[in-house]
Image: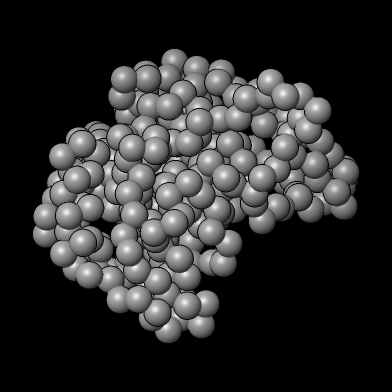
């Protein structure tokens, strides 16, 4: 039997941070709960682990893995606490975020209001380039034009830049050029390009997803770095994994690079738990409801399978 046989599940919510410790040898479960620390959520993680150690002495050195779910990303979007973000896009596509899919949620309400884009218009700049739908280049990108746009955004104080050019999922040459220019001109600025974040057709979905990734990337990256450091400082040698919105897990590095993938990190874990208990008690049809301190989430499980959607709105 391996020396490290404990696994820790840790979920950070808007109000509470919850822990479940599993002993793989005996199957014993130990739980703990403490208040979330909004200024630095890793404080609550360390506090909760130390409280668990009172109940299960010496388990930290025997931890094989820590699986972490969090609503930090979704809450920072809802509360508008992300980074000041800029967008570089193809000429003529500056307002894609506001045009969206032209869906009217209240078609007969002339006073209905829509959420403001994460990137205000003054931080959305264009470059004169064009890639055809088959990936061939219609109009090459002038490096100097891109450089001027990058410098303009940096002068406005942006902390993160999203790059989303027309048809770049077929040919990312221009996006990669801009990424290289940003790295040279402003190495301190976080970068998200659509070819890496979501290389798929449909301009609004690709742009909004890339912008969201850029908006929360600095916050998520710094938090995960602090969390990793905290776990290491208290003697944890187990691997740290982050829950994905898809229900899988990923490494800290990948989560920091693509935080948009962990928007529903914590709530998704709750759905998986509901699915598990449904199978255990022979309840194939269930409605899972997760009431948090900031948001409430729900999921329908039919015939033992949780519903999955290709798109998601915040």
Residue 86: image location, x then y, percent: 32, 44
Residue 167: image location, x then y, percent: 47, 70
Locate the N terminus and report the quarter of the image it occupies: bottom left
Locate the C terminus and report the quarter of the image it occupies: top right
Compared across the picture, whether 37 is left or right of 30 comes to: left
Residue 262: image location, x then y, percent: 49, 46
Residue closer to the observer: 211 or 145: 145
Residue closer to the observer: 26 or 71: 71
Query: Please, is residue 16 above or below residue 127 in the view?
Result: above
Residue depicted at x 74% and y 45% = 275
Residue depicted at x 33% and y 37% = 122
Check the image and tell me how it is coloured: one colour
Compared across the picture, whether 143 is left or right of 239 comes to: left
Kindly tell me whether residue 296 is visible in this rendering: yes
Residue depicted at x 32% and y 29% = 42
Query: Please, is residue 87 above or below residue 40 in the view?
Result: below
Residue depicted at x 51% and y 49% = 96
Residue closer to the observer: 207 or 21: 207
Residue 51: image location, x then y, percent: 38, 21
Q: How many marks?
A: 0
Kindly tell me whether residue 23 is visible in this rendering: no
Residue closer to the observer: 122 or 73: 122
* Residue 288 found in image quarter: top right
Compared across the picture, whether 247 is left or right of 79 comes to: right
């Amino acid at each position: 039997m391996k020396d490290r046989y404990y696994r820790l599940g840790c979920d950070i919510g808007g109000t509470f941070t919850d822990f479940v410790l599993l002993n793989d040898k005996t199957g014993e479960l130990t739980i703990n709960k403490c208040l979330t620390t909004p200024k630095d959520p890793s404080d609550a993680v360390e506090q909760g682990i130390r409280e668990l150690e009172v109940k299960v002495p010496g388990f930290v050195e025997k931890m094989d893995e820590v699986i972490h779910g969090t609503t930090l990303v979704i809450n920072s979007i809802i509360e508008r606490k992300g980074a000041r973000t800029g967008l570089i896009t193809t000429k003529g596509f500056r307002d894609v975020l506001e045009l969206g899919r032209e869906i009217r949620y209240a078609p007969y309400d002339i006073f209905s209001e829509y959420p403001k884009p994460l990137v205000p218009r003054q931080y959305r700049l264009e470059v004169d380039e064009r890639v055809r739908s088959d990936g061939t280049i219609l109009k090459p990108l002038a490096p100097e034009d891109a450089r001027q746009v990058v410098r303009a955004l940096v002068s406005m104080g942006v902390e993160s830049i999203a790059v989303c050019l027309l048809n770049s999922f077929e040919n990312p040459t221009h996006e990669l050029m801009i990424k290289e220019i940003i790295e040279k001109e402003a190495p301190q600025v976080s970068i998200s390009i659509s070819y890496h974040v979501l290389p798929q057709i449909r301009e609004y979905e690709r742009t909004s997803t890339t912008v969201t990734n850029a908006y929360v990337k600095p916050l998520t990256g710094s938090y995960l770095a602090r969390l990793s450091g905290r776990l290491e400082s208290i003697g944890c040698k187990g691997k740290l994994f982050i829950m994905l919105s898809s229900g899988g897990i990923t490494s800290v590095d990948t989560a920091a690079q693509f935080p948009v993938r962990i928007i529903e990190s914590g709530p998704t874990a709750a759905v998986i738990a509901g699915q598990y208990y449904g199978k255990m008690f022979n309840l194939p049809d269930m409605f899972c409801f997760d009431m948090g301190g900031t948001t409430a989430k729900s999921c329908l499980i039919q015939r033992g399978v949780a519903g999955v959607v290709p798109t998601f709105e915040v």
